[in-house]
Every structure is written in structure tokens, then in C-alpha cells.
Amino acid sequence: MKALLPAALLLSLSTLLPTAAHAGPKAETLAACLGDNTTGKDRKDLARWIFIAMASHPEIKDLSNVTEASRDSADQAAAQLLMALLTERCKAQAREALQQEGQAGMMAAFQTLGALAMAELTSNPQVARAISGFERHMDRARMEAALGGK
């Protein structure tokens, strides 16, 4: 279990796109508990941790100036939250999901929390504008023709 949780949590929380992880009933119960037992601040802290982790990739590292102090602070906040969720707030649900649905159940539940963390950020108007910025570079007529529009 020691090796299972860090890998499952990192993969699940850092995933921005839906994947094929199956959410069984225990994973769904855990996902609901995780959502109900995190605040907007908790979710922003998780999003910060995800961002900092992703910013360490060599191909995008030059886009951010994350200090070791910031990285350590984000690691501490994520660890504290995940410990509270797994050992206190959602202990029974986490145990059942892991025992009955294994790693796939844990991943599915934490993907939901990752999506909630991303939603905290993308609900900000500045972030929403930045996300939609690529649209000005698209050929709308070509897109409509390809997809059967006008």
C-alpha cells in the first residue's frame, strides 16, 4: 500500500482529462466524501501542488520559477490534506474503496477530487479567458466544414 498511494494520488490529481478509470460504487462514495470534505482553499492548495509538480517537467520547467521553498510548502499542504482525508474525514470510505476496488477505485475517486481542484481555478474569469485564448488562432470556417456545421 505504501507504493500504491503516492503513485495513485499523483496520477489521479494531476489528470486534467477524463480517463478510463472505472468508478465502482465504493469509489463513487469515496469521491463524494472527498468533495464534501474539502474547501475551496483545500482544492486550490491541491491545484497549486499539481501545478508545481507539473512545472518540474524538463520541457516546461522554463515557464515557471518555482522555488524549493514553494515546492516544499505545497508538498506539506498536500500531505496534510491527504492525510486528513484518508485517515480522518473519509477514512472508512477510503478503506472500503481500496479493499473492494483496489487502485482503480482510489484513482477514480481522486480523479474526481482533481477535477474539483481544477474547477476551482478554471472558474476564475482570468483563467477562463486564458484557457479560451487559443480560439483566436483557429480557423472557424474550416472547423465548421470538417464537423458538418454551416
Image (cartoon, grey):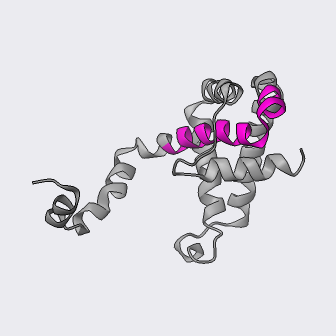
The magenta segment is 95-118
Identify which residue is drawn at 35% across, 57% down: 130
- For residue 104, side relative to residue 65 (left or right): right
Residue furthest out toward the right? 2
Please state which of residues 63 and 33 is positioned toward the viewer in this rendering: 33
User: To which quarter of the image does residue 94 belong?
Assistant: top right
User: To which quarter of the image does residue 36 belong?
Assistant: top right
Identify which residue is drawn at 57% across, 49% down: 19
Identify which residue is drawn at 90% across, 47% down: 2
Identify which residue is drawn at 24% across, 69% down: 137
- Quadrant of image for the N terminus: top right
- For residue 94, side relative to residue 138 (left or right): right
Q: Where is residue 134 in the image (x, y as percent from the top left)?
A: 31, 64
**Vertical placement of 58 versus 88: above or below?**
below
**Vertical placement of 38 versus 19: above or below?**
above
- For residue 104, side relative to residue 1 (left or right): left
**Vertical placement of 13 versus 101: above or below?**
below
- Quadrant of image for the C terminus: bottom left
Please state which of residues 18 and 130 is positioned toward the viewer in this rendering: 18
Q: Position of residue 55 (x, y in %)?
A: 60, 66
Q: Is 109 inside the magenta-drawn segment?
A: yes
Residue furthest out toward the left? 150
Q: Is 20 inside the magenta-drawn segment?
A: no
Q: Where is residue 17 in the image (x, y as percent from the top left)?
A: 51, 51
Q: Where is residue 67 in the image (x, y as percent from the top left)?
A: 67, 66
